[in-house]
Image (cartoon, helix red, strand yellow):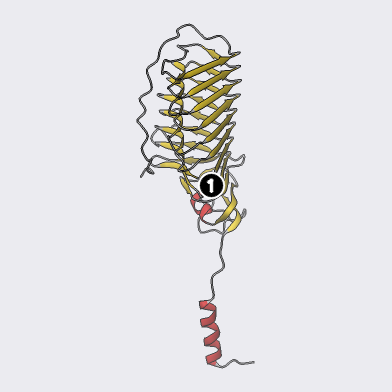
Amino acid sequence: MKFPTTAVTSIAFALLAAPVLSATSLHTWVSGTGSDANTGTRISPYATFATAIANTTAGGIVSAVDSGDFGAITILKAITIDGGSSGATISFTSSEAIYIGAGPTDTVILRHLTITGLGAGPDAIFLSSGQNLIIEDCIVENFTDIGLGIGSSAAANVVVKNTVITGGSLGLRVYQGPGPNRISLRGVTISGASSVAVFVRSGLMEISDSLITMSNIALEVDTNATISVANSVLSYNGTDSLPFSPSTILLSNNNTWFANNGTGGGGGTALRVNTGPVAAGFRIAAPAVVPDDVPRPRRQ
């Protein structure tokens, strides 16, 4: 059957005018040998996390097929980034490795990732907005300023499990905000912070079964913040805890060993319950030089 030319032309225009179906998927994949021109399936993976995120439906998951360096990312929606067992890496030398500006009800999950600043990148992970952030089985290293920054514009829930944060000026910094932020660290190691391993200016934090070590100050809190530390080890720090009024640090069933451990005299409250021996060398510490909080812009 032969269509008239006018009919064929009309059909062609109709097809051109039809809406293009979304290419996004609930599950996309990246690979060290992938290409951002691929379709993002497991057998046709992307090369970067950024492209995978852009093509993943909100609430979906991005997985790594194999090892590779998949680039710094901005997350503006609910999503899971899973490096699997393959050694997925995000290296960065400027801005943040992972910047999260998700919606007020969004959950972001970061799992099985190695995030490295190569000795030059400032902040590894920064939460600007989002309801829930879960970080699990990650390594954060070689950054110069902040390992995990929480500067959320509304109250956020943050859980960090089985993760190592090492180096930089501040291992974990919670900015003063509307709060209360609720933060939980389980099985976390924070080490080598030149200023403070855990610095909190807003909300509530509980730390358990963790190690805070080889930092200038292990814990510093102020501005109505409270930290509870249980079943953990604070070792080789210049000072183990430094609360400023009207903040509180609760220490229960911990061991504080070696170096110049002790509680500094910031005027806040430090309560110790069933805590192990404190090494000799108790001193009144000076606060870390951390600037007062201002609205935190994204690094450029």
Would residue 146 be seen by someone viewing this image from the given angle? yes
* Coordinates of residue 11 in the picture (x, y in percent): 55, 84
* Coordinates of residue 238 in the picture (x, y in percent): 43, 15
Viewport quadrant of the C terminus: top left
* Mark 1 Cα shell of 10 Å, populated few (<14), some (14-19), many (≥20): some
Outermost top residue: 280
**In this view, 273 is above or below 201:** above
Count of marks placed on residues: 1
**In this view, 73 is above or below 9:** above
Would residue 193 be seen by someone viewing this image from the given angle? no
User: Residue at 56% across / 49% down in the picture?
Assistant: 79
* Coordinates of residue 239 in the picture (x, y in percent): 45, 16
Tell me the element at label 1: loop
User: Residue at 53% across / 31% down in the picture?
Assistant: 204
65 or 276: nearer the eye? Answer: 276
283 or 210: nearer the eye? Answer: 283
Q: Is residue 221 left or right of residue 164?
A: left
Viewport quadrant of the N terminus: bottom right
184 or 21: nearer the eye? Answer: 184
233 or 163: nearer the eye? Answer: 233
* Residue 43, quarter of picture: bottom right
User: Residue at 35% across / 30% down in the picture?
Assistant: 291
**In this view, 272 is above or below 43:** above
Outermost front residue: 246
Q: Which residue is mark 1?
A: 32
